[in-house]
Amino acid sequence: MQLPPADRTTSPFTGYTRAHWEAAADTLLTAVEPYATRDRALYHLPGDRTSWSGRLSDGLEGYARTLLLAAFRRDEKALERYADGLAAGVSGVWPRIGDRSQPLVEAASIALALRLTRDLLWDRLDDGVRQRAADWLGDALTAEPWPCNWELFPVTVGGFLAEIGHRPDASRTAIDRGLERIEQWYVGDGWYTDGDGRKFDYYNGWAMHLYPVLHAWLERDERLLE
């Protein structure tokens, strides 16, 4: 990985600036490209173990997680590749989103990426692809999540679908349900448990803080940002 020289003036502790993180992101996106299937719908990353959800779901995870990086980076060239993968994925390649299934997790990453890059990706897709993608994501609105940070995945999908006018009532129901649920786990001073009981872990910062703030920012909801 080729990184810019360390900048100890701007960043005295690590020497890293935005340029360093951009270089790291670009390197990662380049590194995963050889592991994409020919239709780019799945990314089968190297390793000798398959997760409990199976190889197909793992390939979807490889697509969704790296798409999210490309979306935050707003990399138009990379997003073109992911647009091809999206078209293939929602045409029968990707597994359906079911109750407490891993595709529910990946649907949130895909929906967030599509929302962050709507002008660069979603708005450029064919109408048929958009309809199939919305239908695939729509199953996340009623899929039962695990009673933990997973409650935020239907929220994230619902935010995008509501924005594009797909099943707006069901989208709003999913959003309200998930946000209300996690508030029951707030214990004060910025801390959430990851479900009922004393289940404190890294999802407090990675999920409980991140997803609601992103949702509020994208909704432009000042109440939620307070």
Image (tube, rainbow, N blue to C red):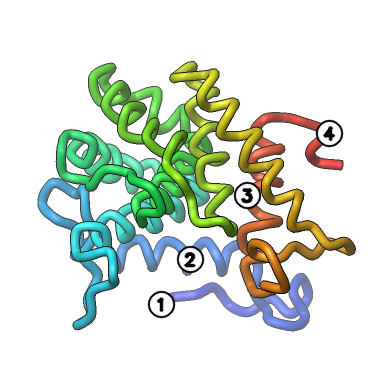
Secondary element under disc 3, as helix, strand or loop, is helix
Identify the amino acid type marked 3. Tyr
Relative vertical location of residue 22 with respect to residue 1 in this rendering, above or below? above
Which residue bears the numbered disc 1? 1
CB within 8 Å, label 2 to label 1? yes
Q: Which of 224 and 41 is in front in this view?
A: 224
Instruction: Please give the name of the residue rendered at 75% of the width and 83% of the height, measured from the top-left corner.
Output: 13
Say left or right for 40 vs 149. left
Point out the frontmost of discs 4 and 2. Answer: 4
Q: Mark 4 or 3 closer to N-term? A: 3
Position in image of residue 154 (x %, y %)? 51, 41
Dot 1 alpha-carbon crowd within 10 angstroms: few under 14, some 14 to 19, many 20 or more: few
Position in image of residue 100 (x %, y %)? 41, 53
Q: Mark 4 or 2 closer to N-term? A: 2
Which residue bears the numbered disc 3? 211
> Which quadrant of the figure has residue 15?
bottom right
Task: Name the disc covering residue 223, or none.
Answer: 4
CB within 8 Å, label 4 to label 3? no
Which residue bears the numbered disc 2? 23
Position in image of residue 68 (x %, y %)? 45, 51
CB within 8 Å, label 4 to label 2? no
Q: Which of 152 and 44 is in front in this view?
A: 152
